[in-house]
Image (spheres, grey):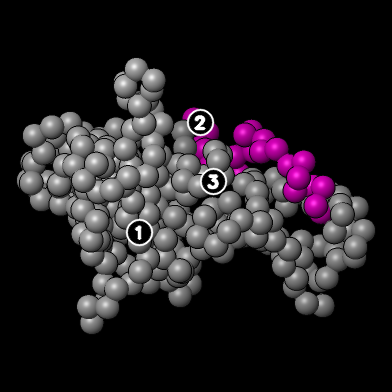
Amino acid sequence: MAVTKYSYVKTVNQKQLRDEISASAITIAVDHLDQVGIALDIYMKDIISAGDIVILDGLVTDHVIDTSQVDDQVDDDGATVIRLKAAKKGATYHLHYLCFETSGQNSLKETDYTGASLNFSTISFFKYTLDMDGNPTNTLESCMEDMAEVTQVDFVPTHDYEIIGGEVRVYEKPIQDTFLYVIGAPDLPVPFGSKIMVQNCNLKFYGKGEPVKADGKVSKGMRYTNEGIPDGYGNKLRFYVRHHRGTNLELQARIEMFKL
């Protein structure tokens, strides 16, 4: 017998789905489940038949998380039990830094210790379109950096990681409203992605070099390759800065992670 993996894109209650598989007509026992972000791997104790694959596909498709199945995560008083989470075997604690400037075309700095570019991140610029009366709309279009009202940096490393938290610092205190957003997996719809980690943070209220901090307390898996979606959709982290047209502000982002 050889443990065999079957992969899906689905967020599940692992205990609940494991029980559903065990109670089904599938003849091979389930070994374990592994959930990283929206990527789900089901490990069966051996290869299952074509008929059992149909049953397994149906169980995953029809699975609806039962919020009453808390899997011993609350105590007798109904309070949430907090536990320490360890990184996966082989993971390395890692601080990743990248620097960029709003409305700055060639400002992105992200290198290894030799000075070579890592090429994990890209920078883009957008402005708001105008309606027939010349008033700005909520629709964005790509533009040159000197016309930018939004600067966007997408971090997409070519490896899996578990994000813990991070921070953003601005070199000079902005004198005008400058709003920061950080979004996880922005190309995927809710609930699979588009996770807002920092929302509507006005950097005008932060001093020179003062950090905007985010700490998730426990790590969250971000997988580069996921079945059914393009590579990089599952581990993309977006820094989105809304500012006055052509404003130049230097920022440094720090991403705290376990690198897999």
Residue under label 2, please give it.
Answer: 78
Distance from the alpha carbon under mark 1 to that under mark 2: 45 Å
Asked if residue 60 is among those painted magenta in the image, a careful observer would answer yes
Q: Specify whether 181 is left or right of 48.
A: left
In depth, the one of 70 and 25 nearer the eye is: 25
Q: Which span is picked out in magenta?
A: 56-77
Residue under label 1, please give it.
Answer: 122
Asked if residue 128 is among those painted magenta in the image, a careful observer would answer no
Helix, strand or loop status at disc 2: loop
Q: Crowdedness of circle 2 by 10 Å Cα count: few (<14), some, many (20+)? A: few
Task: Give residue 173's position: percent from left, percent from top.
Answer: 8, 41
Look at 76% across and 45% down and name the residue there.
61
Residue under label 3, please give it.
Answer: 188
Q: Look at the image and tell me whether residue 79 can be seen.
A: yes
Distance from the alpha carbon under mark 1 to that under mark 3: 18 Å
Q: At label 3, which amino acid type do we have? A: Leu
